[in-house]
Image: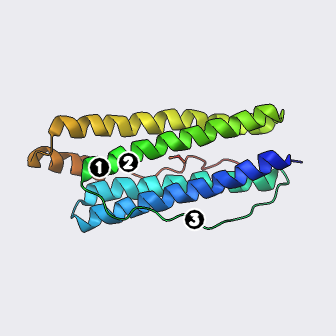
Amino acid sequence: MIKKAVDVALNEQINAEFHSAYLYLSMSAYFLSEGLAGYANWMRIQYQEELTHATRFFDYVNERGGVVKLTPIGEVQVDFSGVVDVFEKTLIHEKIVTGLIDRLMEISIKESDHATKSFLQWFVDEQVEEEANVDQILRNLKLIKGEGQGMLMMDREMQTRVFVDPFAGAKA
Ligand code: FEO
């Protein structure tokens, strides 16, 4: 049976992951409104990935005999000042999520919950990758400096991203 402090923190993380999904879907909508289909696609897939994170936490709470309590998802930004602005905000957001995962890990250690520590390790590693990916996109954008040809090429590259369920085949 899961301890109360861990149950509460995991429930907060379910909400945070849905909030991330909502934010990235909002960014996707912004890109669509700007006629940037490739960037919109990248954010749409980011949204889908966040949904898998949320449901993985959801399933884990249930597996451990905890109680899932879904709470309202906070408002997200709907307007942005360009592609660089969106990815800068994405990087800031992912760093916040990394902090939340680290905090969850600390709570699990404090509560001697080894199963949750093991479960969280995937997310610790995922956050390293998430931050690195967004940082690389930002570096590329800064090299292009908003130049039309480069922006278009990058938009086409972003269009090639496909969704792969990271938990496909994993126990529900
Ligand atoms: Fe679920 Fe982008 O971290």
The image shows residue 140, relative to residue 29, as above or below, that is above
Instruction: Tell which circle, 2 or 3, labels the residue nearer the N-terminal end.
Output: 3
Image location (x, y in percent) of residue 75 = 49, 65
> Which residue corresponds to the image point at 17% horizontal and 48% vertical from the top-left?
151
Q: Give, as a three-letter code, the residue at label 2.
A: Lys
Which type of secondary structure does the marked residue at label 3 adopt?
loop
- What is the residue that sits farthest to the right in this orientation? 1
Residue 33 figure quarter = bottom left
Residue that label 1 marks: 85
Q: Could you tell me the amino acid type at mark 1?
A: Asp
Q: Residue at x 79, y 56 (%)?
A: 62
Mark 2 surroundings: few (<14), some (14-19) or many (≥20) residues within 10 A: some
Q: Nearer the viewer, residue 84 or 63?
A: 84
Disc 1 secondary structure class: helix
- 10 Å crowding of disc 3: few (<14), some (14-19), many (20+): few
Q: Which residue is mark 2?
A: 89
Circles 1 and 2, Cβ within 8 Å, touching? The answer is: yes
| Foreground of the two, 46 or 83 | 83
> Which amino acid is tagged 3?
Ile
Q: Residues within 10 Å of mark 1 (few under 14, many from 20)?
A: few
Q: Quadrant of the C terminus?
A: bottom right
Q: Quadrant of residue 108?
A: top right
Residue drawn at 57 percent across, 54 percent down: 17
Residue 6 is situated, as x and y percent measured from the top left of the image, at 78, 45
Q: Which mark is residue 120?
A: none
Q: Does residue 172 show up?
A: no
Left or right side of 160 for 107:
right
Residue 159, position in %: x, y? 29, 53
Instruction: Identify the residue under disc 3.
Output: 73
Q: CA distance from mark 1 to mark 2?
A: 6 Å
Disc 2 residue: CB within 8 Å of ligand 1: no
Residue 81 visible in the snapshot? yes
